[in-house]
Amino acid sequence: MGIMKINVAVLFGGKSVEHEVSIISAVQAMANIDTEKYRVVPVYITKDNEFYYGEDLRDIRLYRNLKGLVARCRRVVFIREKGRVRLVKYPGGLFSGGPICDIDVALPVVHGTNVEDGALQGYLKTLDVPFVGCNVLASAVGMDKYVMKILLKEAGFPVLDCLRFTVPDPENVKKVEAKFGYPVIVKPVNLGSSVGISKAAGPEELEHALTDAFAFSDKVLVEPAITQLREINCAVLGDASEAIASECEEPFATDQILSYKDKYVDGGKSKSGASKGMASLKRQIPAELPPELRQRIQELAVGTFQTLDCNGVARIDFMIDKADGSVWVNEINTIPGSLAFYLWQPVGIKYPDLLERLIALALKRRRKEEEITYSFDTNILSMGGPFGSKGRK
């Protein structure tokens, strides 16, 4: 009799501008999960938020004809039944063939708004299925760069000052000029992967940058640009009680800031022309850093991770001002592209081992949650009293 495998639903795609990046990351992850211990259940989320299951979803080559690929898959939904979460065919009916399988744990490999920002995590929480990664609040905070800055600043971490705009207005340019001058960086508040981010060195560039950013988000953040910028990234693995830092990397941009094109188009092409994502970006690992600076960045990374109550793996991006050597926390990626596996390999954690640890952390959190009381034996509805529409006086 064989070992009972753990069913892992790998969720990817979704209604996000980083939809395609998510596919790349998920296919990489599915190829590295230990199939002796886990059964991989690929669940693709379309841009219309429809769920599809099919083994063909594990082959990156088939995504060249996405419409044909989805047509060969089966539309599915998650349901909770008799204390279990099941993946079932949709629509059901007499001849649907019943549930595909029970789901023991979910592995969201998603990026961007509507999937990484706590929305998908809230759905999984409502289903009451253990899931890898940050909880609802940490996911939302990690996606909202402005809220993240406020919390980190309150906790004493070095973050750049900023302005947040919620509506396009000609006065925004004047406000930026009065507070920062030029140059500045303009970015959507709730997007990753450098989408909609640009640098402005004057009023016309700033106006264009704000318009571009508002096309991707209803909230836009502006902060002073570091003219002698050096970027350093460091990942963290763990939870609130214990977390470790990865090796540090220095990514290289073809422009003044690392763009979406740098990450996923130019730097991410394989010989076949299919993007390999962040794993193949031009970078130096380990980054050339003095030991004390490397240690400071790793400590800041772990501190940021735990201050924001993160879980699983996250990548924290730092900025160094070469003019004075100051270090700034730029942002956190709660589900980093490729799950940042390339930062763990240099410290002896291979990709399958990383995935194993992530699943273990999800199940550990479930065990802790089961110790918390969520209900009382007392039923106030059985006590009688004026519970009508007027309420209690």
Image (tube, rainbow, N blue to C red):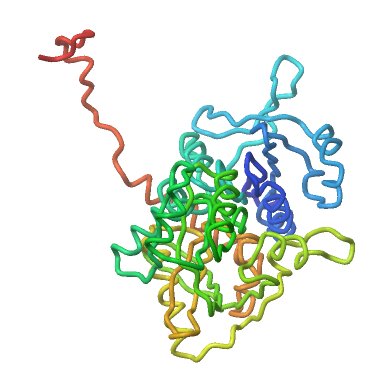
Query: Does 4 appear above or below 257?
Result: above
Q: Position of residue 294 (x, y in %)?
A: 48, 84
Query: Does 388 appear above or below 331?
Result: above
> Observer-nearest residue: 326 or 91?
326
> Observer-nearest residue: 42 or 168?
168
Point 50% across, 42% down: residue: 218
Q: Position of residue 201 (x, y in %)?
A: 55, 66
Residue 334 as seen in the image, left or right of residue 66: left
Point 60% across, 53% down: residue: 196
Point 61% across, 59% down: residue: 194
Residue 314 as seen in the image, left or right of residue 102: left
Q: Quadrant of residue 342?
A: bottom right
Q: Is residue 105 something one can see in this rendering?
A: no
> Observer-nearest residue: 232 or 198?
198
Q: If the image is split into quadrants, where does the C terminus sit?
A: top left
Q: Position of residue 130 (x, y in %)?
A: 50, 45
